[in-house]
Image (cartoon, coloured by chain):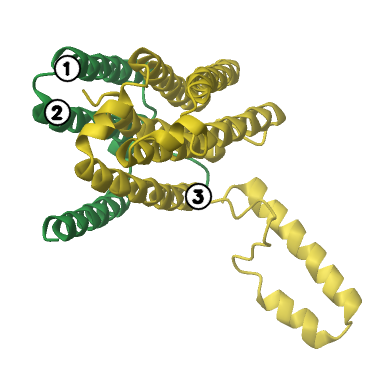
Chain colours: A yellow, B green
Amino acid sequence: MTIRMQKEVKEMEDWSVGVMVKKQNTEHQTLNIKNMNHAFTLPNSGHNFDAKASKMGMWLFLYTELLLFGGLFLVYMVYRSMYPDEFLLASFNLDVWMGTLNTVILLTSSMTIAMSITALQKGNKKLSIQLMWITIAAALGFLIIKYFEWGAKFEHGLFPGMDHFGTLPTGERLYFYLYFFMTGLHGLHVIIGAIFIVFVIFGVKKGTVTPERYSLLENSGLYWHLVDLIWIYLFPLFYLIH
Amino acid sequence: MENKNEHITSYKEHFSTYAALILLTFMTVFISVFGADLRTLSVATAMLIATTKATAVAYYFMHMKYEPKIYKVMLATVIILFAFFMMMITIDYLTR
């Protein structure tokens, strides 16, 4: 613990002792508090920050995300093995080049957010913020392309519940159910990830995220990489059945 | 209790990872679009390339390379758990 932190903890303790003494001015209480003087940290005082625990919490959350999408991939696996030809036929409705472009966009944004951590670690706040904005721009680009892709499907009546969708064979319907659900859920993660990064940008500007204390940036980066990771599997499974 | 003594990954390392990922992406698209005759092979290849990419993202971008062992053990547990689910479902559908 640094001297500054020790001093602050001391002040915090003195303050709490004062409160207790005011509340119940008995010798017994005061003594009790004084005996607690070792390693005493108030919750939310800012002194109980633990970068390692914070990162491990984020990873644990990411594992639950992996299993969420994992379950959907298992559903996909089963139905694709049951209707291989209809899955192939339905996949021709997707534009491979738009999918490729989106893959490149997500990979680029993954690199920029990873680099923004490097920049902040090296103390270059400005570059770090710029790289985060590039990541958010990429997220928006991804969503815009996704909008055009989904828009084309809507025009062709391929969304579950539409007229043309109802006339399709079972296998193709299952393909579109899974396509819209999985890319939709992934798109939601893109939106959440981008909002998370915006918060980190404000954190860096306000000074709550610093070169000494960048856990929030690191965790938003981990989340963003997960988004990329899921897309790495979604892309070949939906676009590249040839 | 601050983020001290953590490894700083260089810009160069990030860029190399990125270049490899882009290369693998174009490889998988190329195989799929122009290697249509190798259909069964293509599914396995696509998954193999995707897994290679995912590993690169986790290992370099997500800093798994520099993390303590416990993170790697936890990740391995999740992967084994998922592989187990996959195996059980495959066995289930193959024996119906």
Check disc 1 and report its element: helix, strand or loop: helix
Q: At x 13% / y 16%, what residue is drawn? A: B35
**Closer to the camera in the image, A79 or A201:** A79
Check disc 2 and report its element: helix, strand or loop: helix
Chain identifier of the residue bearing label 3 in the image: A
Q: Is residue A121 above or below residue A19?
A: above
The residue pinned by badge 3 equals A54
The residue pinned by badge 1 equals B31
Task: Assess whether mark 2 and mark 3 are in contact (beta carbons under 8 angstroms).
Answer: no
Query: Which quadrant of the view contains residue B34?
Result: top left
Chain identifier of the residue bearing label 2 in the image: B
Tags 3 and 1 both on a single chain: no
Considering the image in quadrants, where does the C terminus of chain A appear?
top left
Q: At x 50% / y 46%, what residue is drawn? A: A51
Chain identifier of the residue bearing label 1 in the image: B
Side (left or right) of A167 relative to A22: left
Q: Is residue B49 above or below residue B24?
A: below
The alpha-carbon separation of the residues under discs 1 and 2 comes to 8 Å
Q: At x 47% / y 33%, what residue is drawn? A: A224
* Residue type beneath disc 3: Ser
x, y percentage for residue A189? Answer: 51, 37
- Give the mark nearer the N terminus: 1 vs 2: 1
Tags 1 and 2 both on a single chain: yes
Q: Which mark is residue B45?
A: 2
Q: Which mark is residue A133?
A: none
